[in-house]
Image (cartoon, rainbow, N blue to C red):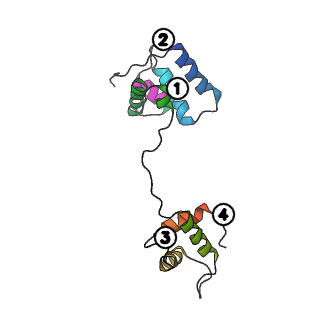
Amino acid sequence: MNQKYTIELSDEERQHLEKITSAGIAPARMVKRAQILLKSDRKAEGSAWKYEQICAAFNVTPVTVLNIRKSFVEKGMAATLCRKKPEREYAHALDGEEEAYLVALACSEPPEGRKVWSLRLLKDRFIRLGHVDNISHETIRTVLKKTNSSLG
């Protein structure tokens, strides 16, 4: 693979990466990225490992090695080692008050002829009570999963 992104670590950067790989407290993803950067270093004893050697040693693809090297060259060490926060914001279907009504409904007596609430029964009743116009039973499940209430 073309070695377009060459890594030349300073002594300080090398020490920091070696500390990450040897301390045993960093997340596995960070350790693997640090190891790849250390083996990619041109100024290391000997010379930098080739893509194939790194891929075999750390069980990664050449694209992964390329992306790590590219990230280091373009964004620096911190951005390369740390996981990127998701850019997408998820809108919540229910606010806190609506969730409270849903939990209260789930803890109430089930409809006549039923022993327990099903997710679809809860969905239908919740819509009929006018708390929301529409909601999926999967949203009901995720809201109830967040609570510590026992329905059994």
Q: Name the residue under label 3.
A: 137
Q: Mark 2 points at which residue?
A: 46
Q: Where residue 21 appears, x then y in whole percent?
A: 59, 26
Sequence-wise, the earlier of marks 2 and 4 is 2
Sequence-wise, the earlier of marks 1 and 3 is 1
Q: Where residue 132 appears, x then y in whole percent?
A: 46, 72
Q: Where residue 126 appears, x then y in whole percent?
A: 51, 76
Q: Is residue 131 above or below residue 14?
A: below
**Residue nearer the viewer, 61 or 17:** 17
Sequence-wise, the earlier of marks 2 and 1 is 1
- What is the C-alpha distance between the residues marked 2 and 1? 16 Å
Amino acid bearing label 1: Gln
Sequence-wise, the earlier of marks 3 and 4 is 3
Assess disc 3: are there few (<14), some (14-19) or many (≥20) residues with their C-alpha within 10 Å of its C-alpha: some
**Residue beneath the point at 52% across and 27% down:** 34
- What is the C-alpha distance between the residues marked 1 and 3? 45 Å
Please, what secondary structure does the residue beneath circle 3 have? helix
Amino acid bearing label 3: His
Tell me the magenta residue range. Answer: 41-57
Q: Mark 4 points at which residue?
A: 148
Q: Is residue 24 magenta?
A: no
Amino acid bearing label 4: Asn
- What is the C-alpha distance between the residues marked 3 and 2? 60 Å
Q: Is residue 45 above or below residue 68?
A: above
Q: Mark 1 points at which residue?
A: 35
Whether pointer 2 and pointer 1 mark residues with C-beta atoms closer than 8 Å, the reply is no
Please, what secondary structure does the residue beneath circle 1 have? helix
